[in-house]
Image: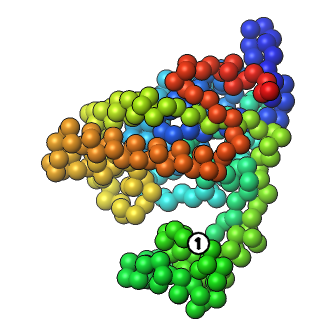
């Protein structure tokens, strides 16, 4: 996607182009998306799993009301915390918003930190079957009792040698066991049969990962942790906890809910809560960076600490 200036306004020459902006938490994705949207007459579409939830405005660092009023924003705060959204559900919503933006002659700009969302958009996605809770519990109990070797043995007994021999991570082994226990079909078969075509082939999207230096990112994370412990952040978590929702729901596992909840319950001081938030957010950012490096190695990378602008991204790649 090359850029040209018409009357002081930058426009994308490729009418079918979609812009994807990924990056770790607190890396400045939203600010860059706003700048691009202003220059390209864009629509910003959320690609962050926690920012989907209506109850997590400050905790999930959703764009402010002023920011959302200035540029169209979609899929922010559209799912109640009582609902467990999924990658497949998000992809369906995102596809609708992309089509709507294109039909209006606007550039869709997808921004967020959920790597699996971007992977589904650009590589396709296999919708997995629902697993009953009792089956899930049995598989997890086995994992706790017997570890990875016990999971492998169970998978071999049930005929999924591919997962037993090819997977190392205990969580992925547990997931493979859940699926074959619930459906009688190996996870790999579900993945092959259910794989959808990518919604956004490389020819119709510009793909960017923000890759900041660790010290710069850590400073921003520390500032965000203090903001989350503000009166507004504490009230947001208090109201969420008052709903009595299951702790297994995605919104209840968001960084900030447990940490602020402990502070509200008098289990730790404010400074200890800030420390816990900072550590948890740093660990999450590190996991995000590992995902982007391993799964999105061919995406364009920019260092946000170097005061990048929209033009840095819009310039033709060499």
Specify the quadrant that holds the C terminus: top right
Place residue 35 in its image quadrant.
Answer: top right
Q: Is residue 50 above or below residue 300?
A: below
Q: Indicate the position of residue 153 as horizontal and vertical percent values.
A: 53, 87
| Residue at 32%, 55% in the rendered image | 243
Q: Indicate the position of residue 23 as horizontal and vertical percent values.
A: 56, 38
For the residue pair 140 and 64, the one nearer the viewer reads as 140
250 vs 239, left or right, is: right
Q: Indicate the position of residue 220 as horizontal and vertical percent values.
A: 41, 30
Q: How is the image coloured?
A: rainbow
For the residue pair 301 and 178, the one nearer the viewer reads as 301
Q: Indicate the position of residue 251 as horizontal and vertical percent values.
A: 43, 53
| Residue at 55%, 19% in the rendered image | 307
Q: Residue furthest bottom?
A: 157
For the residue pair 180 and 288, the one nearer the viewer reads as 288
Dot 1, crowdedness within 10 Å: few (<14), some or many (≥20)?
Answer: some
Say what secondary structure mark 1 lies in: loop
Q: Which residue is mark 1?
A: 167
For the residue pair 131 and 143, the one nearer the viewer reads as 143
Place residue 14 in its image quadrant.
Answer: top right
287 vs 185, left or right, is: left
223 vs 166, left or right, is: left
Place residue 260 in its image quadrant.
Answer: top left
Specify the quadrant that holds the N terminus: top right
| Residue at 17%, 47% in the rendered image | 268
Q: Is residue 130 above or below residue 221?
A: below
Q: Residue furthest top?
A: 7
């Amino acid at each position: 996607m090359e850029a040209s200036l018409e009357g002081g306004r930058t426009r994308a020459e490729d009418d079918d182009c979609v812009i994807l902006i990924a990056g770790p938490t607190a890396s400045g994705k939203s600010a860059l998306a706003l700048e691009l949207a202003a220059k390209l007459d864009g629509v910003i579409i959320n690609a962050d799993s926690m920012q989907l939830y209506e109850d997590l405005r400050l905790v999930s660092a959703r764009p402010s009301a002023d920011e959302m009023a200035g540029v169209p924003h979609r899929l922010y705060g559209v799912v109640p915390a009582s609902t467990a959204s999924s990658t497949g559900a998000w992809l369906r919503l995102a596809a609708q918003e992309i089509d709507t933006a294109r039909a209006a002659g606007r550039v869709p700009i997808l921004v967020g930190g959920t790597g699996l969302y971007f992977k589904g958009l650009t590589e396709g996605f296999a919708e997995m079957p629902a697993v009953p809770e009792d089956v899930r519990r049995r598989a997890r109990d086995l994992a706790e009792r017997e570890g990875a070797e016990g999971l492998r043995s169970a998978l071999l007994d049930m005929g999924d040698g591919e997962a037993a021999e090819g997977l190392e991570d205990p969580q992925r082994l547990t997931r493979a066991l859940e699926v074959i226990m619930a459906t009688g079909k190996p996870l790999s078969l579900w993945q092959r049969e259910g794989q959808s075509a990518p919604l956004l082939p490389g020819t119709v999207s510009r793909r960017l990962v923000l890759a900041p230096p660790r010290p710069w990112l850590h400073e921003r994370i520390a500032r965000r942790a203090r903001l989350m412990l503000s009166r507004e952040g504490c009230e947001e978590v208090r109201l969420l906890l008052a709903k009595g929702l299951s702790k297994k729901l995605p919104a209840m596992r968001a960084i900030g809910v447990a940490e602020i909840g402990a502070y509200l319950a008098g289990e730790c001081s404010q400074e200890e809560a800030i420390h816990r938030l900072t550590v948890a957010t740093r660990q999450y950012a590190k996991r995000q960076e590992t995902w982007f490096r391993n799964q999105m190695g061919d995406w364009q990378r920019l260092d946000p600490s170097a005061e990048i602008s929209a033009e840095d991204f819009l310039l033709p790649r060499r």
